[in-house]
Image: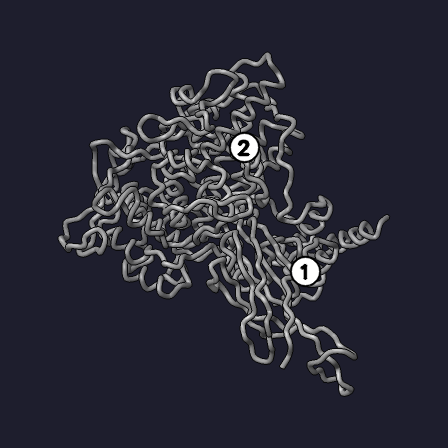
Amino acid sequence: MSLLDATLDSVRQLVSRLERRFLSRSTGGRQKHRNIRRLRSEALETRQLLAADMMPFAHNHFDPEDVNDDGVVAPIDALMVINSMNRNAPSDTAGFIDVNNDGFRSPMDALMVINRLNRQNPPPGTQRPPTREPIPSPTSEEVRSIDGTNNNLQDTSLGSANTPLLRVADADYADGISEPAGAERPSTREISNLLSAADPEGTRSDRGLSAFIYVWGQFLDHDIDLSMSQTDGETFDIAVPTGDPLFDPNGTGLVTIPLSRSEFDATTGTSIDNPRQQVNSVTSYVDGSMVYGSSQEVADSLREGVGGRLLMTDADLLPSDGTGGVMAGDIRAAENISLTALHVLFAREHNRLADEISAQDSSLTDEEIYQRARAIVIAEIQAITYNEFLPALLGNRALSRYDGYDASVDPRIANEFSTAAYRFGHSTLNDDIEFFDNDGREVLDGISLADAFFQPQILEETGIDSLLKYEASTQAQEVDLQVVDSLRNFLFGPPGAGGLDLAALNIQRGRDHGLSDYNSTRVAYGLEPVTTFAEITSDVDLQENLESLYASVDNIDLWVGLLAEDHVRGASVGELTKTIIADQFERLRDGDRFWYENVFTGADLRNLRQTSLSDVIERNTTVNGLQQNVFFMVATVSGRVSAAVVDNPSGQRRPGAGGNTRDVGVENVTVELLNDAGDVLATTVTDRHGNYRFDSHSLHETGDYQIRLAESAGVDIGLTEPLGILISNGMTRLRGLDFRVSLV
């Protein structure tokens, strides 16, 4: 037995003993079974919330299993966790011991390190070869319908296109039937002006989420829900406050932002017992309908008719639809070029798979090739969503374990999800779009987001490669109430010339749909209601603004309350937002008879589970060197500032050279991070060992940077030159950026 094996065996035995003791103490010796959440979520225990908030155990966001942050995952990392538990210190700060980022230290943290060692995974940033051969094959020849019908064999229309949305909380129309809610609340533009004006400096994601959190989020959203607006029907325009600097600069008091009410099921809205219910025009399932369509007519129009392929241009882009848009499975595909790029990417992936399937078996028909490629693409979309996107957004283990298909689960989209909770992404968009090469450097001039709406022809000049690299290489804005100007003031045009306010529209749409207020929705999802604004947010200014607008915690528009929430530990959303999103995606998974883990097995299933968005990008573009998980941009740089000292006979140290010279780290030296233009982005000071570090809170995107020393008391930095560095991808980790100084 090798030394490593022996050490691991000892660690496992320690973990086993600790786990038995931990379970005995926390569950009376019995491990409790967690039921799968259906329509209502379990309330978080107060004990757990307090523990998560109060315990200071640190988590290594860059590489969770690297507890001592030395760049190597080794048995010592598991032992550090175990030693911390044995000490039972209430505020142990020895290393990054909270491996799973749940706010606790437990045997699970040590087990995660051991599992990493057993798998012998490469450290983050190393490239895994893209998943390729063999082409996975479903275990059944049955294919899912295009429109979502016949998925649930007990209710064949469940989750299909053009069926009503689900409600978890009761409808809250003004008349209880169909009249919009919120008549007694302020104008949604007034709310937007007070709560959603973006900080000019931006509020970058605190957890280092990349721009793919909103690009994939929108791509996925267009797979599972679409509420169409009425044509020449009811309107519900937004009143603009008199003198609004952008929408009513002349102070007329007559300006409105137009909004048509959503289409609804004509059989509803007839009485208090039968309130209006809006319709989902696309399939509810995560079934790639944004690529393939939600109707047979659309699906057929996108096909080449030969070799199972989808129609593409000579430049391998989506064809024009003749009206300024593109031919895709969803009518919103041209909304912005980042979204269009993902549509192009997965159409290419389909055709790549179709070509390989055809080459392996020349006897297959066009339809057979198409359906096999479609099944794999859908599986990849599901795997990326559940294995990368949702953990990035909600944190690890936010969803229950998959136990197989359950026909009793309702997979429909909840109105609270589509009209409020899943619109979190509108706060995360950046105000510009850039184009990067494989080194992470800008290769084309960027454009504002406002100039990228419905302009798919831009991709004819730029292609999708540099755009996808950029999305992986820059951080998103924080999930909060702030919305960038391109969306809040210039959505689809300038004010008065088509410009809209997306924040105001979100709130107004919630009122149009008769969504319950924030507190009532908490109760409907199994959470305790709040009694003060401080229970929603710790931001005192935001508390005061909410109170000035709503007066009572029982009158808050749902979208506002959701985005105002303090984030749950280890997640980028608040408690109710996390609960609604987790509930929805559990039901979409458990209620889907064609879920990929239900129809693929063995090595095929393992390959699909391992497929990442970076794999799909690198297979279908010239992009290479992406970080393995493109939903995070968490680069770090670190180094040490040291000086040579000589010990005198009394043991005191003094500057000097020769004799008993030794190297020591120098504390409290100021270190600066500069961009390629020479602007100081961040400063830090060295610790007592002379170490310094800049992480994702300072390094917001890839590119060229400099590290330099600033004049500091007690040291002479002399002619020390700045260090030039290149951050080439979102998992770049540069160490050993050291400086030598003299003590004075």
Q: Residue 390 carries which label?
A: none
The residue closer to the viewer here, 21 or 649, is 649
Task: Give the structural element (helix, strand or loop) at label 2.
Answer: helix
The local crowd at label 2, few if under 14, some if 14 to 19, many if 20 or more residues have their Cα within 10 Å, is some
Asked which quadrant contains residue 10, the reply is: bottom right
Residue density around tag 1, few if under 14, some if 14–19, many if 20 or more, within 10 Å: many
Q: What residue type is labelled 2?
A: Asn
Residue ID at (55%, 47%): 439
Q: Residue at x 60, y 33 (%)?
A: 608
Above-or-below relation of 261 to 373 = below
Q: In which quarter of the image is the C terminus?
A: bottom right
Mark 2–mark 1 Cα distance, whole angstroms, equals 38 Å
Q: Is 166 left or right of 499, judged from the image as shown? A: right
Q: What residue type is labelled 1?
A: Asn
Q: Mark 2 points at which residue?
A: 620
From the viewer's perspective, tell me whether residue 268 is left or right of residue 395.
left
Q: How many numbered discs, if any?
A: 2
Instruction: Tell me what residue is drawn at x 38 percent, y 56 percent.
Output: 564
Indicate the position of residue 419 as horizontal and vertical percent values.
Answer: 35, 42
**From this viewpoint, is residue 73 visible?**
yes
- Could you say where residue 392 lies in the image, as x and y percent from the top left? 52, 47
In the figure, 591 relative to 671: above or below?
above
Name the residue tied to disc 1.
68
**218 left or right, relative to 17:** left
Return the residue found at the far right.
1
Residue closest to the eye, 205 or 279: 205
Decide if residue 155 is in sight here: no
